[in-house]
Image (cartoon, helix red, strand yellow):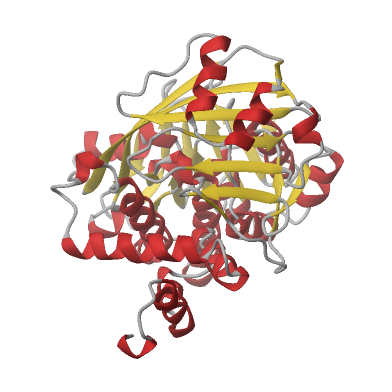
Amino acid sequence: MQGGSMDPLEEQAQAVVIGSSVAGLLAAAALADRYEQVFVVEPMIAQPLPQAHHVHGLLSSGWEAMQQLLPGLKHRLINERVCWVHYGKEFRWKHFGRDKVGFEDEMVGPFCSRQILQHAIRTEVLSLPNVVVISGRVDALLGSSRKLTGVQLSDGAEITGELVVDASGRQAIGALCLKNQGFADIPETHYPVNLKYSSLRVQAGPQIHHAAWKSLFVIPEAPKTESGAIFPLEDGSFLITLSGRGDDRMPKTVEEWYSFADRVGDAEFSACVAECQPLDEMNHYRFTEALWRQYHKGKVPKNFYAIGDALCSLNPLFGQGMTLCALGALALRDTVQRSGDGASRGYFELVSRAVGQAWNMTKLEDMRYPQWEEQCSPLSKKLQNYTRDVYAVSSQCPRTNFRLYQVIHLQKSVSALFAPWLIRKVLQYRNLPSSTA
Protein backbone atom coordinates (compact mmCIF):
# COMPACT_ATOMS: atom_id res chain seq x y z
CA MET A 1 0.00 0.00 0.00
CA GLN A 2 1.32 3.45 -0.91
CA GLY A 3 0.22 7.03 -0.42
CA GLY A 4 -1.92 7.87 2.65
CA SER A 5 -2.06 5.70 5.75
CA MET A 6 -5.80 5.61 6.53
CA ASP A 7 -7.43 2.22 7.21
CA PRO A 8 -9.31 1.03 4.07
CA LEU A 9 -11.94 -0.55 6.32
CA GLU A 10 -12.72 2.73 8.03
CA GLU A 11 -16.26 3.90 7.28
CA GLN A 12 -16.16 7.24 5.52
CA ALA A 13 -16.80 8.82 2.11
CA GLN A 14 -14.61 6.71 -0.16
CA ALA A 15 -14.13 6.15 -3.89
CA VAL A 16 -12.42 3.25 -5.68
CA VAL A 17 -10.47 3.46 -8.94
CA ILE A 18 -9.58 0.23 -10.78
CA GLY A 19 -6.23 0.75 -12.51
CA SER A 20 -3.21 3.00 -11.93
CA SER A 21 -2.08 4.08 -15.39
CA VAL A 22 -2.61 7.67 -16.57
CA ALA A 23 -6.40 7.28 -16.66
CA GLY A 24 -6.61 5.87 -13.15
CA LEU A 25 -4.21 8.41 -11.65
CA LEU A 26 -6.04 11.35 -13.21
CA ALA A 27 -9.37 9.91 -12.07
CA ALA A 28 -8.00 9.73 -8.52
CA ALA A 29 -6.89 13.36 -8.74
CA ALA A 30 -10.36 14.32 -9.98
CA LEU A 31 -12.02 12.61 -7.00
CA ALA A 32 -9.60 13.72 -4.29
CA ASP A 33 -11.44 16.99 -3.56
CA ARG A 34 -14.81 15.28 -3.23
CA TYR A 35 -13.98 12.14 -1.21
CA GLU A 36 -12.24 11.73 2.11
CA GLN A 37 -10.27 8.84 0.67
CA VAL A 38 -9.63 7.54 -2.83
CA PHE A 39 -8.32 3.99 -3.29
CA VAL A 40 -6.47 3.12 -6.50
CA VAL A 41 -6.22 -0.63 -7.11
CA GLU A 42 -3.25 -1.54 -9.27
CA PRO A 43 -2.05 -4.97 -10.46
CA MET A 44 0.28 -6.79 -8.07
CA ILE A 45 2.61 -7.38 -11.01
CA ALA A 46 3.34 -4.21 -12.96
CA GLN A 47 1.67 -4.29 -16.35
CA PRO A 48 3.90 -3.23 -19.27
CA LEU A 49 2.76 -0.21 -21.24
CA PRO A 50 2.51 -1.63 -24.77
CA GLN A 51 3.18 1.77 -26.32
CA ALA A 52 5.69 3.04 -23.77
CA HIS A 53 8.67 2.88 -26.13
CA HIS A 54 6.98 4.70 -29.00
CA VAL A 55 6.12 8.31 -29.76
CA HIS A 56 3.33 9.62 -27.53
CA GLY A 57 1.18 12.65 -28.20
CA LEU A 58 -0.40 14.89 -25.59
CA LEU A 59 -2.80 17.33 -27.22
CA SER A 60 -3.04 20.87 -25.89
CA SER A 61 -6.53 20.36 -24.43
CA GLY A 62 -5.23 17.33 -22.55
CA TRP A 63 -2.26 19.25 -21.20
CA GLU A 64 -4.54 22.08 -20.06
CA ALA A 65 -6.83 19.56 -18.34
CA MET A 66 -3.90 17.88 -16.58
CA GLN A 67 -2.76 21.23 -15.21
CA GLN A 68 -6.24 21.91 -13.82
CA LEU A 69 -6.21 18.54 -12.08
CA LEU A 70 -2.57 18.70 -10.94
CA PRO A 71 -1.35 22.31 -10.65
CA GLY A 72 2.15 21.20 -9.66
CA LEU A 73 2.67 18.97 -12.71
CA LYS A 74 4.22 21.63 -14.95
CA HIS A 75 6.86 22.53 -12.37
CA ARG A 76 7.67 18.86 -11.86
CA LEU A 77 8.12 18.34 -15.62
CA ILE A 78 10.31 21.43 -15.82
CA ASN A 79 12.52 19.85 -13.16
CA GLU A 80 12.63 16.68 -15.27
CA ARG A 81 14.05 18.82 -18.12
CA VAL A 82 11.33 17.90 -20.61
CA CYS A 83 11.28 19.68 -23.95
CA TRP A 84 8.59 22.33 -24.49
CA VAL A 85 7.37 22.67 -28.07
CA HIS A 86 5.33 25.49 -29.60
CA TYR A 87 3.10 23.78 -32.14
CA GLY A 88 2.93 26.78 -34.45
CA LYS A 89 6.67 27.54 -34.48
CA GLU A 90 8.58 24.41 -33.49
CA PHE A 91 6.45 21.45 -34.58
CA ARG A 92 7.06 20.62 -38.24
CA TRP A 93 4.08 18.73 -39.66
CA LYS A 94 4.32 17.42 -43.21
CA HIS A 95 0.76 16.40 -43.98
CA PHE A 96 -0.57 14.95 -47.23
CA GLY A 97 2.62 16.03 -49.00
CA ARG A 98 2.62 19.65 -47.75
CA ASP A 99 4.30 21.45 -44.87
CA LYS A 100 1.90 23.19 -42.50
CA VAL A 101 2.50 26.93 -42.33
CA GLY A 102 3.53 28.30 -38.93
CA PHE A 103 1.34 30.39 -36.62
CA GLU A 104 2.05 32.71 -33.69
CA ASP A 105 -0.94 31.82 -31.50
CA GLU A 106 0.03 30.29 -28.17
CA MET A 107 -0.09 26.48 -28.20
CA VAL A 108 2.70 24.83 -26.22
CA GLY A 109 3.04 21.35 -24.76
CA PRO A 110 5.60 19.04 -23.09
CA PHE A 111 7.43 16.46 -25.19
CA CYS A 112 9.00 13.60 -23.25
CA SER A 113 8.92 9.85 -22.80
CA ARG A 114 5.69 8.23 -21.62
CA GLN A 115 7.58 6.85 -18.63
CA ILE A 116 8.69 10.24 -17.34
CA LEU A 117 5.25 11.79 -17.86
CA GLN A 118 3.48 8.95 -16.08
CA HIS A 119 6.03 9.02 -13.24
CA ALA A 120 5.46 12.77 -12.80
CA ILE A 121 1.68 12.31 -12.76
CA ARG A 122 1.95 9.42 -10.30
CA THR A 123 4.22 11.42 -7.97
CA GLU A 124 1.82 14.37 -8.00
CA VAL A 125 -1.22 12.18 -7.34
CA LEU A 126 0.42 10.20 -4.53
CA SER A 127 1.39 13.45 -2.85
CA LEU A 128 -2.31 13.99 -2.21
CA PRO A 129 -2.84 12.88 1.41
CA ASN A 130 -6.14 11.08 0.76
CA VAL A 131 -5.06 8.96 -2.22
CA VAL A 132 -3.98 5.37 -1.45
CA VAL A 133 -2.63 2.80 -3.91
CA ILE A 134 -3.41 -0.85 -3.12
CA SER A 135 -1.90 -3.83 -4.97
CA GLY A 136 -4.45 -6.43 -5.97
CA ARG A 137 -6.83 -7.69 -8.61
CA VAL A 138 -10.50 -6.77 -8.70
CA ASP A 139 -12.64 -9.90 -9.11
CA ALA A 140 -16.12 -8.51 -8.47
CA LEU A 141 -18.15 -5.37 -7.94
CA LEU A 142 -20.10 -5.16 -4.68
CA GLY A 143 -23.62 -3.82 -4.33
CA SER A 144 -26.77 -4.01 -6.39
CA SER A 145 -27.86 -3.33 -9.95
CA ARG A 146 -28.91 0.11 -8.78
CA LYS A 147 -25.84 1.17 -6.80
CA LEU A 148 -22.40 -0.26 -6.10
CA THR A 149 -20.90 -0.37 -2.62
CA GLY A 150 -17.29 -1.17 -3.57
CA VAL A 151 -15.11 -3.92 -5.02
CA GLN A 152 -13.86 -7.34 -3.98
CA LEU A 153 -10.25 -8.35 -4.60
CA SER A 154 -9.01 -11.80 -5.60
CA ASP A 155 -7.81 -12.48 -2.02
CA GLY A 156 -11.32 -11.86 -0.70
CA ALA A 157 -10.62 -8.39 0.71
CA GLU A 158 -13.33 -5.80 0.16
CA ILE A 159 -12.88 -2.09 -0.42
CA THR A 160 -15.99 -0.05 0.14
CA GLY A 161 -16.74 2.96 -2.00
CA GLU A 162 -19.54 5.32 -2.83
CA LEU A 163 -18.25 5.43 -6.38
CA VAL A 164 -16.29 2.98 -8.58
CA VAL A 165 -14.26 4.00 -11.64
CA ASP A 166 -13.03 1.47 -14.19
CA ALA A 167 -9.65 2.70 -15.46
CA SER A 168 -8.22 -0.75 -16.21
CA GLY A 169 -7.50 -0.18 -19.90
CA ARG A 170 -8.76 -2.23 -22.82
CA GLN A 171 -9.24 -5.29 -20.60
CA ALA A 172 -12.06 -3.29 -18.94
CA ILE A 173 -12.25 -5.23 -15.67
CA GLY A 174 -15.32 -3.26 -14.62
CA ALA A 175 -17.23 -4.12 -17.78
CA LEU A 176 -16.25 -7.79 -17.41
CA CYS A 177 -17.43 -7.84 -13.78
CA LEU A 178 -20.73 -6.24 -14.76
CA LYS A 179 -21.25 -8.89 -17.43
CA ASN A 180 -20.34 -11.74 -15.06
CA GLN A 181 -22.77 -10.35 -12.51
CA GLY A 182 -25.74 -10.40 -14.87
CA PHE A 183 -25.75 -6.97 -16.49
CA ALA A 184 -26.61 -6.70 -20.15
CA ASP A 185 -23.64 -6.22 -22.47
CA ILE A 186 -22.67 -2.60 -22.96
CA PRO A 187 -23.15 -1.55 -26.61
CA GLU A 188 -19.83 -1.47 -28.41
CA THR A 189 -18.70 -0.08 -31.73
CA HIS A 190 -15.37 -0.88 -33.33
CA TYR A 191 -13.54 -0.92 -36.64
CA PRO A 192 -10.21 -2.38 -37.82
CA VAL A 193 -7.12 -0.16 -37.94
CA ASN A 194 -4.16 -2.57 -38.23
CA LEU A 195 -1.54 0.05 -37.39
CA LYS A 196 2.06 -1.04 -36.75
CA TYR A 197 4.93 0.77 -35.05
CA SER A 198 8.70 0.21 -35.05
CA SER A 199 10.67 2.64 -32.88
CA LEU A 200 14.22 3.43 -31.87
CA ARG A 201 15.63 5.84 -29.30
CA VAL A 202 18.55 7.53 -31.03
CA GLN A 203 21.40 9.95 -30.69
CA ALA A 204 20.57 12.67 -33.19
CA GLY A 205 22.89 13.91 -35.91
CA PRO A 206 23.63 17.50 -37.01
CA GLN A 207 20.50 17.95 -39.15
CA ILE A 208 18.14 17.42 -36.21
CA HIS A 209 20.22 19.52 -33.82
CA HIS A 210 20.42 22.41 -36.29
CA ALA A 211 16.83 22.19 -37.55
CA ALA A 212 14.40 25.07 -37.11
CA TRP A 213 11.95 22.60 -35.55
CA LYS A 214 12.06 20.55 -32.36
CA SER A 215 9.79 17.78 -33.60
CA LEU A 216 8.95 16.43 -37.05
CA PHE A 217 5.82 14.50 -38.06
CA VAL A 218 5.21 13.09 -41.56
CA ILE A 219 1.72 11.81 -42.42
CA PRO A 220 1.05 10.79 -46.05
CA GLU A 221 -2.19 10.88 -47.96
CA ALA A 222 -3.91 7.53 -48.49
CA PRO A 223 -3.40 5.08 -50.03
CA LYS A 224 0.24 5.57 -48.97
CA THR A 225 0.64 4.00 -45.54
CA GLU A 226 4.18 4.66 -44.27
CA SER A 227 4.63 7.56 -41.85
CA GLY A 228 7.23 8.74 -39.35
CA ALA A 229 7.78 10.96 -36.32
CA ILE A 230 10.82 12.43 -34.57
CA PHE A 231 10.18 13.54 -30.97
CA PRO A 232 12.65 15.00 -28.43
CA LEU A 233 13.12 13.28 -25.07
CA GLU A 234 14.05 14.67 -21.68
CA ASP A 235 17.59 13.22 -21.71
CA GLY A 236 18.60 14.94 -24.95
CA SER A 237 18.03 11.87 -27.12
CA PHE A 238 15.24 11.53 -29.69
CA LEU A 239 12.58 8.92 -30.26
CA ILE A 240 11.82 7.98 -33.86
CA THR A 241 8.70 5.97 -34.62
CA LEU A 242 8.02 4.50 -38.05
CA SER A 243 4.50 3.28 -38.74
CA GLY A 244 2.74 1.22 -41.35
CA ARG A 245 -0.65 -0.37 -41.90
CA GLY A 246 -2.26 -3.55 -43.12
CA ASP A 247 0.15 -5.71 -45.11
CA ASP A 248 3.17 -3.45 -44.62
CA ARG A 249 6.21 -5.49 -43.64
CA MET A 250 7.76 -3.74 -40.66
CA PRO A 251 11.53 -3.81 -40.11
CA LYS A 252 13.14 -6.52 -38.00
CA THR A 253 16.72 -5.28 -38.18
CA VAL A 254 18.26 -1.83 -37.84
CA GLU A 255 19.23 -1.95 -41.51
CA GLU A 256 15.63 -2.63 -42.49
CA TRP A 257 14.52 0.16 -40.15
CA TYR A 258 16.65 2.73 -41.99
CA SER A 259 15.32 1.42 -45.29
CA PHE A 260 11.72 1.74 -44.06
CA ALA A 261 12.43 5.36 -43.09
CA ASP A 262 13.21 6.06 -46.76
CA ARG A 263 9.83 4.60 -47.71
CA VAL A 264 8.12 7.38 -45.73
CA GLY A 265 8.93 9.42 -48.82
CA ASP A 266 10.16 12.69 -47.32
CA ALA A 267 13.71 13.78 -48.11
CA GLU A 268 14.19 15.82 -44.92
CA PHE A 269 12.92 12.99 -42.72
CA SER A 270 15.16 10.44 -44.47
CA ALA A 271 18.23 12.66 -44.15
CA CYS A 272 17.61 13.22 -40.44
CA VAL A 273 17.09 9.52 -39.73
CA ALA A 274 20.19 8.52 -41.74
CA GLU A 275 22.43 10.52 -39.38
CA CYS A 276 21.00 9.03 -36.17
CA GLN A 277 22.69 6.35 -34.08
CA PRO A 278 20.53 3.79 -32.20
CA LEU A 279 20.82 3.86 -28.40
CA ASP A 280 18.50 0.96 -27.55
CA GLU A 281 16.94 -2.10 -29.11
CA MET A 282 14.11 -1.66 -31.57
CA ASN A 283 10.58 -1.83 -30.14
CA HIS A 284 7.43 -2.88 -31.93
CA TYR A 285 3.73 -2.34 -31.34
CA ARG A 286 0.55 -3.27 -33.18
CA PHE A 287 -2.89 -1.75 -32.78
CA THR A 288 -5.56 -3.90 -34.39
CA GLU A 289 -8.88 -2.11 -33.89
CA ALA A 290 -10.54 0.95 -32.40
CA LEU A 291 -13.13 0.23 -29.70
CA TRP A 292 -15.76 2.39 -27.97
CA ARG A 293 -17.87 1.03 -25.12
CA GLN A 294 -20.92 3.23 -25.35
CA TYR A 295 -21.99 3.36 -21.73
CA HIS A 296 -24.22 6.35 -22.49
CA LYS A 297 -26.44 3.93 -24.42
CA GLY A 298 -26.39 1.12 -21.82
CA LYS A 299 -27.50 0.52 -18.27
CA VAL A 300 -25.09 0.36 -15.34
CA PRO A 301 -25.26 1.10 -11.60
CA LYS A 302 -25.69 4.82 -11.09
CA ASN A 303 -22.29 5.20 -9.39
CA PHE A 304 -20.21 3.20 -11.90
CA TYR A 305 -17.88 5.15 -14.21
CA ALA A 306 -15.33 4.25 -16.90
CA ILE A 307 -12.44 6.28 -18.25
CA GLY A 308 -9.52 5.99 -20.67
CA ASP A 309 -9.15 2.84 -22.75
CA ALA A 310 -11.75 1.12 -20.58
CA LEU A 311 -14.17 3.51 -22.27
CA CYS A 312 -12.62 4.14 -25.69
CA SER A 313 -9.41 3.10 -27.43
CA LEU A 314 -8.55 4.93 -30.65
CA ASN A 315 -5.95 4.76 -33.40
CA PRO A 316 -2.82 5.98 -31.51
CA LEU A 317 -1.42 7.67 -34.62
CA PHE A 318 -3.65 10.65 -33.79
CA GLY A 319 -2.31 11.00 -30.24
CA GLN A 320 -5.70 11.37 -28.53
CA GLY A 321 -5.47 8.69 -25.81
CA MET A 322 -3.95 10.60 -22.89
CA THR A 323 -5.94 13.70 -23.78
CA LEU A 324 -9.23 11.79 -23.57
CA CYS A 325 -8.09 10.46 -20.17
CA ALA A 326 -7.52 14.01 -18.95
CA LEU A 327 -10.76 15.36 -20.41
CA GLY A 328 -12.62 12.38 -18.94
CA ALA A 329 -11.12 13.10 -15.53
CA LEU A 330 -12.28 16.72 -15.72
CA ALA A 331 -15.78 15.54 -16.65
CA LEU A 332 -15.66 13.12 -13.71
CA ARG A 333 -14.60 15.87 -11.30
CA ASP A 334 -17.26 18.28 -12.52
CA THR A 335 -19.98 15.61 -12.41
CA VAL A 336 -19.37 14.45 -8.84
CA GLN A 337 -18.90 17.97 -7.54
CA ARG A 338 -22.18 19.02 -9.10
CA SER A 339 -24.32 15.95 -8.55
CA GLY A 340 -22.61 13.66 -6.04
CA ASP A 341 -22.09 9.96 -6.76
CA GLY A 342 -25.37 9.24 -8.51
CA ALA A 343 -24.75 10.88 -11.87
CA SER A 344 -22.81 8.42 -13.99
CA ARG A 345 -25.47 8.71 -16.69
CA GLY A 346 -24.75 12.43 -16.93
CA TYR A 347 -21.02 11.77 -16.92
CA PHE A 348 -21.21 9.26 -19.76
CA GLU A 349 -23.32 11.64 -21.82
CA LEU A 350 -20.89 14.48 -21.14
CA VAL A 351 -17.71 12.56 -21.89
CA SER A 352 -19.24 10.99 -25.01
CA ARG A 353 -19.05 14.42 -26.68
CA ALA A 354 -15.26 14.55 -26.54
CA VAL A 355 -14.95 10.83 -27.29
CA GLY A 356 -17.42 11.13 -30.15
CA GLN A 357 -15.51 14.00 -31.76
CA ALA A 358 -12.20 12.15 -31.50
CA TRP A 359 -13.79 8.92 -32.77
CA ASN A 360 -15.46 10.55 -35.76
CA MET A 361 -12.33 12.46 -36.79
CA THR A 362 -10.03 9.45 -36.64
CA LYS A 363 -12.50 7.14 -38.33
CA LEU A 364 -13.02 9.62 -41.17
CA GLU A 365 -9.26 9.67 -41.75
CA ASP A 366 -8.89 5.88 -41.43
CA MET A 367 -11.69 5.46 -43.98
CA ARG A 368 -9.56 7.11 -46.66
CA TYR A 369 -7.89 3.73 -47.27
CA PRO A 370 -9.08 1.45 -50.09
CA GLN A 371 -10.48 -1.31 -47.85
CA TRP A 372 -13.15 1.16 -46.70
CA GLU A 373 -14.25 2.16 -50.21
CA GLU A 374 -17.54 0.26 -50.18
CA GLN A 375 -18.43 1.28 -46.60
CA CYS A 376 -17.67 4.99 -46.97
CA SER A 377 -20.97 6.87 -47.29
CA PRO A 378 -21.47 9.74 -49.79
CA LEU A 379 -21.52 12.20 -46.86
CA SER A 380 -18.25 10.81 -45.51
CA LYS A 381 -16.64 11.18 -48.92
CA LYS A 382 -17.80 14.80 -49.12
CA LEU A 383 -16.35 15.46 -45.68
CA GLN A 384 -13.09 13.81 -46.69
CA ASN A 385 -12.89 16.01 -49.79
CA TYR A 386 -13.60 19.13 -47.76
CA THR A 387 -11.08 18.36 -45.02
CA ARG A 388 -8.48 17.47 -47.66
CA ASP A 389 -8.89 21.00 -49.01
CA VAL A 390 -8.70 22.43 -45.48
CA TYR A 391 -5.40 20.58 -45.07
CA ALA A 392 -4.14 22.16 -48.30
CA VAL A 393 -5.19 25.66 -47.20
CA SER A 394 -3.51 25.09 -43.82
CA SER A 395 -0.20 24.89 -45.67
CA GLN A 396 -0.71 28.47 -46.84
CA CYS A 397 -2.84 30.30 -44.27
CA PRO A 398 -1.69 30.58 -40.60
CA ARG A 399 -5.22 31.33 -39.41
CA THR A 400 -6.53 28.17 -41.05
CA ASN A 401 -3.72 26.06 -39.67
CA PHE A 402 -4.32 27.34 -36.14
CA ARG A 403 -8.04 26.59 -36.46
CA LEU A 404 -7.23 23.08 -37.71
CA TYR A 405 -4.92 22.56 -34.72
CA GLN A 406 -7.64 23.75 -32.34
CA VAL A 407 -10.02 21.12 -33.72
CA ILE A 408 -7.45 18.33 -33.82
CA HIS A 409 -6.37 19.19 -30.27
CA LEU A 410 -10.01 19.00 -29.15
CA GLN A 411 -10.13 22.66 -28.14
CA LYS A 412 -12.94 23.35 -30.61
CA SER A 413 -15.64 21.20 -32.15
CA VAL A 414 -15.46 20.01 -35.75
CA SER A 415 -18.09 22.60 -36.64
CA ALA A 416 -15.33 25.23 -36.29
CA LEU A 417 -13.92 23.96 -39.60
CA PHE A 418 -17.12 25.17 -41.26
CA ALA A 419 -16.86 28.79 -40.15
CA PRO A 420 -17.89 31.10 -43.04
CA TRP A 421 -14.40 32.59 -43.38
CA LEU A 422 -12.86 29.11 -43.64
CA ILE A 423 -15.42 27.93 -46.20
CA ARG A 424 -14.50 30.98 -48.29
CA LYS A 425 -10.82 30.05 -48.01
CA VAL A 426 -11.58 26.53 -49.24
CA LEU A 427 -13.67 27.81 -52.13
CA GLN A 428 -10.90 30.20 -53.13
CA TYR A 429 -8.50 27.27 -53.10
CA ARG A 430 -10.89 25.37 -55.36
CA ASN A 431 -11.19 28.46 -57.59
CA LEU A 432 -14.93 28.52 -57.10
CA PRO A 433 -16.94 31.75 -56.71
CA SER A 434 -17.65 32.46 -53.04
CA SER A 435 -21.30 33.13 -53.89
CA THR A 436 -21.84 29.37 -54.19
CA ALA A 437 -21.05 28.88 -50.48
Q: Residue furthest front?
A: 431
Query: Is residue 178 placed above or below 101 in the rendered structure?
Result: above
| Most distant residue in the bottom direction | 435
Viewer-nearest residue: 272 or 299: 272
Q: Position of residue 373 (x, y in %)?
A: 18, 47
Q: How many marks?
A: 0
- Estimate the x, y position of residue 358 in percent, counting from the top left: 41, 56
Res. 364 image quadrant: bottom left
State the image coordinates of residue 3 (x, y, percent, origin top left).
70, 36
Which image quarter: residue 191?
Answer: top left
Q: Residue furthest left?
A: 374
88 w.r.t. 323: above or below? below
Is 75 on the left-hand or right-hand side of 57?
Answer: right
Who is closer to the viewer here, 79 or 178? 79
Residue 415 visible, this angle? yes
Residue drawn at x 50%, y 59% as measured from the top left: 408
Seen at 40% across and 76% down, the residue is 418
Q: Quadrant of the N terminus?
A: top right
Name the outermost residue toward the right: 79
Q: Nearer the viewer, residue 194 or 274?
A: 274
Task: Identify the image quadrant of residue 276.
Answer: top right
Q: Position of residue 323 (x, y in %)?
A: 54, 51
Q: Which part of the image, by quadrant, shows the C terminus?
A: bottom left
Regarding residue 50, the answer to whether it shows in the image is: no
